[in-house]
Image: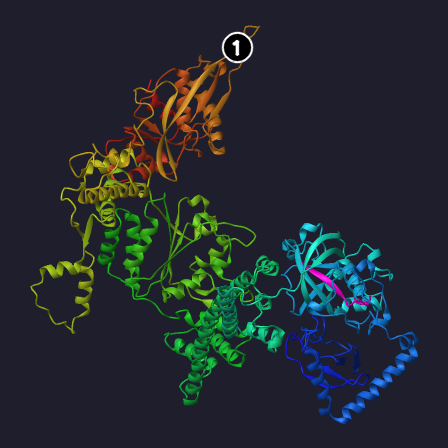
Amino acid sequence: MMLRRSILSRPTARSFSSCTNHGCIRSRIAPPLQHPFSRASSGLTHAPTLSSFSCLSHGDTFYSGAHYTQHRCFFFGNSGNDNDDDNDKKGKDSKDEKKEEDKKEDDKENNKEDEKDASSDPENSSDDSEPSPSLDNSSKHKKMSSSTVHRSSSSPNILLPASRLGFGDQAPRYPHLMALPVTRGPVFPGVLTPITITDQKTIKAVEKIMSGGSGGYFGLFLRKDPSDVSKGLEKPEIITSASDLYSVGTFAQIQRMTKSPFDEAREEDHTHPFTSDKNGHDAEDSNSDDDNLHNIYSGSSLLVMPHRRINLLSVDDVGPPVDVTVAHWEKLQYVKGIDSSRDDTIRALCQEVLSTIREVAQMNALFKEQVVNLVPSSHLFDMNDPYRLADFAASLSSGGDAVDLQSVLEEKDPELRLHKALVLLTKEREVSKLQKEISAKVEEKMSEAQRKYFLTEQLKSIKKELGMEKDDKDTLIEKYRKKLSEYPSIPEDIDEIIESELDKLSTLEKNSSEFNVTRSYLDWLTNIPWGVTTEENFDISDARRILDSDHYGMDEVKEIILQFIAVGKLKGSVQGKILCLAGPPGTGKTSIAESVAEALGRKFFRFSVGGMSDVSEIKGHRRTYVGAMPGKIIQCLKSTESTNPLILIDEIDKLGKDFRGDPASALLEVLDPNQNATFRDHFIDAPVDISKVLFVTTANEIDRIPGPLLDRMEVIRLSGYDVPEKLKIAQQYLVPKSMVSSGLMVKESLEEEKLDNDDGEKEEPDTEKSEKEESESKKSEYTEPVYRLAEKVPESLSINDSALESLVRWYCREAGVRNLAQKIDKITRLLSLQVVAEEEGAKLTEKSSRQSDTWEVSEENLHHYVGKPIFTSDRLYEKDPLPHGIVMGLAWTSMGGTALYIETQGIKRGLDHEGKRRGGGTLKATGQLGDVMKESTQIAYTVARARLADVAPDNDFFDVTDIHMHVPEGATPKDGPSAGITMVTAMLSLALDRPIKSDLAMTGEVSLTGKVLPVGGIKEKVMAARRAGIKTIVLPEDCRRDFDELPDYLKDGITSNYASDYSSVFDVAFGKD
């Protein structure tokens, strides 16, 4: 017989000697295959192996060694051929080449084993006949026979019976078999294949088949839908119907079965922690989670040798295990010479298959190893046999689709089978090419990175050897000392802290966490500009020019800054100051602070505290926290690189407060001139002098600022702009700025003017220019900017004053100019669109196209650019006099001053059954009034009743009439006591049935006895009166000073009356009797 050996995962050493029982060749093989649960597969040392000696002629197997762990199987591919006798003869002749010592040792061992077996099993010694094969190899008909198995079932490796019934096409043809479903792909004949099973019933059935003496044959069928199995929803061995399996499978024989360590332990010890409960009961009888562990760790590995194809006729039992009835395929042989063209095609396909295998093996190392393991010699398959070549090629396609592999298994035509196998190999080739490209790219990147790393390390070593580079810690310390040497003066306590930290840094390891904390601390300590100040500008006229160039008005702010500069010039030193700019939005509070910094020559730093509720933002984090850093004050000193910057704290009236602290309280130290000379940040934890810093804060409502914090600031109130001021601001600032940003205008710089006036000769720079000349040249830089129209812009394009005045009066009545700037930007953007569209000849929509023949924006065509006016009149009531019970009042809001009406209406009830009037003597107030204003209505009602009793004792209006008072614009919240005298006048107008003049407005708080108390916001209220066209106003006597300080243009045309009690107000409103 010709001996053929199959390769598992790697080449195996083999030696031959003579069989002591029959005198023929025996083989000694150490198998390389390891079960996944074995120690060798996990990287541990291989267990001692047992050498197996198989008699190639008679099938007997002998063993020697300490402990058996693996078994080697042989495939007799051409059993029954004419060359078998020659092979047997060669095998017998080879025994003479072995050493006599090995023969004697083997004879002794085998004789001892035979004697031991004869003494322990008399039945075997008397009867050497082999059990005859049964026509039914189903697991339901097998009986366990320990005489035919060399190892017990408790062993992790169950071996084949010693007697083999046939291999390949010579294997028996059982019609009834146990079927084992597979999921990854079909199994092809002639390819030794490992299979793992997990179902316990199937495992027991396999053990029964192997111990039945029939050779361990069963069928392998591919599942049609393995997706549920891959998701872990069921076990691969379990099916629900015959439709789950393909109709063509493989008839295979079990070569070896290796059980998992879990099953071994379970068989040996029924109290295994994975298989029993605390009381020692079997886990199958308990409802614990150990069944899940059993499903995970249990299982057996089979090594099977497929022999031939079989057709599935029926499924007798879905099991598990699955019992089926099959029909075996006859051996397919291709006969050459019938069709020469077909012979050539098949030969070409065979050559292409082999060429593709060779090409893929050269590109893919894993594929090459697989080919080497499956084809240790050419006798495993015949290259001229298209059927076996196609099977072999398909078995090499590890990544092929299971359906495609099944089609190869089912195909009977040799040409089509080769075609399908070639397609699978072609896919493998393309995947291998892509894998090779990816590997090359990754290797290229890795090589470049490694090259750069090695060169960098070599460069560091060379520099270190030459003394050009020091240790990282030494470099850091040297950098810190160099930085400290640049500062003119460092406080003594700060210097001690820095030296202590430097000494500490030199002793720490670079990889320690303390090293990074100390390094971060030193970074901040050395970046604070100790003693560094910027040179300030003490020229008053120069500062005034800068302030006027950026802002119109704001005389009070500018005067305080000029005073600050004058004091600094006289004293020769500058100290810090805390200013608070309070006013409505859009009045230029933030922008004026930046202009002040430029006028003083200081660095500018801004941060907003609106909504801030964390004290750490002001005073920093303690260094114990991860990611700790100083607060905004220390960050400002580092970023500005000076100790005398101007710090703008924006929105200080909107500070938050929560569990993380109160930032307003933290600002008390910062904004206190007596404390900020020794300001302590939590991170720095050392006194830092910030007394030279000029702090400027902004707020909309100072009433929301805490009292202690407000007490530390000098408040400068910025009132809203009136119509003339808004017109000036729009003409001088807003329109040119918007034109430039829209591309309609270009700002001419001073350098361009010099080039235009230059005659072409260059003057040599005078190195002896005096400081006075430098100062004069510096002043000349702040000249009024010059603007000109850009190219391709019509010369007539402009926004005239009437359009600006209309914008201010009918579109933008707020105190600031932010909304006015937005409207002007809208106009200039539309003008830019029209200019470009006419240049390109593009069509615009009716809304965007130019509606007039001129490029000038005037009051007449303004609505084409900004839409219809928002406000249509200055007053709610245009008729004069006003209806009875209505009076105009003046109020202050955060958006500026406003004129509002107080409306009253009397309601008279009918008579009851006794002839008396129902109701009377009640007051109802509406208009979304605040608590303070609601109290003012009650006080005004009492004062009105008392005043009516004085002027008209017989009038019982308030006794028989209910009063309803309303303040229009109910959606707007209103509060404050300044409408007291207005409410009294409105109710008396209703009671006396006498109207009030339409050009009269008043403001003032009234007490219960009729005293008129002072109120604030006089400038805003007077501006609102002018905007509404009021000619006469009534103010509290104590507000006379505020009115006198107003500019003359605000007071022109307005008659002011002052009242200390309500009788004076009554005389102005109703006239003297």
Of the residues shown, which amino acid type is indicated by label 1?
Arg
How far across and down, in percent of the image, does residue 40 sit?
A: 69, 76
Name the residue rendered at 28%, 51% in the picture: 559
Residue furthest out toward the front:
338
Drawn side of residue 9 relative to residue 502, left or right:
right
The magenta stretch spans which residues?
210-221
Local packing at callout 1 (Cα closer than 10 Å; few below 14, some 14-19, many 20+) is: some
| 665 vs 762, nearest the viewer | 762
Residue 211 forms part of the magenta stretch: yes
State the quadrant of the C terminus. Answer: top left
Going by the picture, which residue comes out furthest to the bottom?
Answer: 100
Viewer can see residue 682:
no
Quadrant position of the N terminus in the picture? bottom right
Which residue is at the front of the view, 72 or 462?
Answer: 72
Colouring of the image: rainbow
Q: For numbered disc 1, what is the local secondary structure?
A: loop
Of residues 239 and 414, the one drawn nearer to the viewer in this rendering: 414
Name the residue at 52% across, 10% down: 917
Q: Position of residue 57 (x, y in %)?
A: 76, 79
Q: Residue 907, image x and y in percent? A: 47, 15
Image location of residue 312, percent across then percent down: 69, 55
The answer to whether residue 914 is visible is yes
The residue that mark 1 highlights is: 917
The verdict on residue 41 being magenta is no
